[in-house]
Image (cartoon, helix red, strand yellow):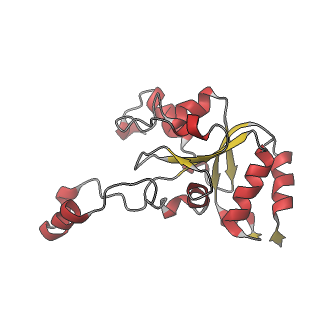
Amino acid sequence: MLVARSRLVRDLGELGLGPGGAAMVHCRMSALGRVLGGAETVVRALLDALGPDGTLMAYTGWEDEPPEDLGGLDEETRRIYLEEHPAYDPRVALSRRDHGRIPEALRTWPGARHSGHPEAGVAAVGPLAGTLTAAHPLDDAYGAGTPYARLVELGGRVVVLGAPLGTVTLVHHAEAVAEVPANAA
């Protein structure tokens, strides 16, 4: 069955997503079925459901983030990473593909704002986008003062559209606030 924007808006309303506020989306497109217009349609439907006073946010990450352990690479590969890896630039850095198509669609949406964090960055569109994406600390990706903390402070919602619950990024914020050791998470 072909899924249209009007159906998505109706279904989102039935799930309780209404006008205003902020919402963070996690979506697995394949779980929705064949969506007419793909990721663009899903973003438009979410924005429709939130209305002009609502703000939509998604976790973007960075597709070309260097490996954590450069020491584990052979000498030539390590040299190339150190000398030639591009600097992170949120204006052009692609969202991680394993986060799905919605984050990249939102990152490139007209008027989108980005938090500027290479690993835990978010993109947002709407009246609260500047508030949500402001001053994302580089030394604490998920804790206090991050877009995740601001989403909670604003009473924001998490919209999970067919994505596994293990992909809900707000869990990392809860772990950071609870000071869960990295190896225990």
Instruction: Using residue 169 as the reference point, say whether residue 69 is left or right of it.
Output: left
> In the image shown, does 120 or 33 lie closer to the viewer?
120
Answer left or right for 185 relative to 67.
Answer: right
Q: Is residue 140 above or below residue 153?
A: below
Drawn side of residue 41 relative to residue 113, left or right: right
Image quadrant containing the N terminus: bottom right
Quarter of the figure with residue 102: bottom right
> Count the marks: how many?
0
* Residue 125, x across and y down, in percent: 63, 47
Given the current orientation, which residue lies at the most extreme front position? 111
Residue that appears at 56% across and 31% down? 150
Q: Nearer the viewer, residue 74 or 128?
A: 128
Residue 8 placed where, x, y %? 81, 57
What's the residue at 47%, 33% (across, down)? 175
In the rendered view, does 7 fall on the left or right side of 169? right
Q: Is residue 118 above or below residue 94?
A: above
Write the residue at 50% across / 36% down: 134
Name the residue rendered at 59%, 50% in the picture.
112
Query: Residue 161 placed where, x, y %?
Result: 70, 54
Estimate the x, y position of residue 14 in percent, counting from the top left.
86, 46
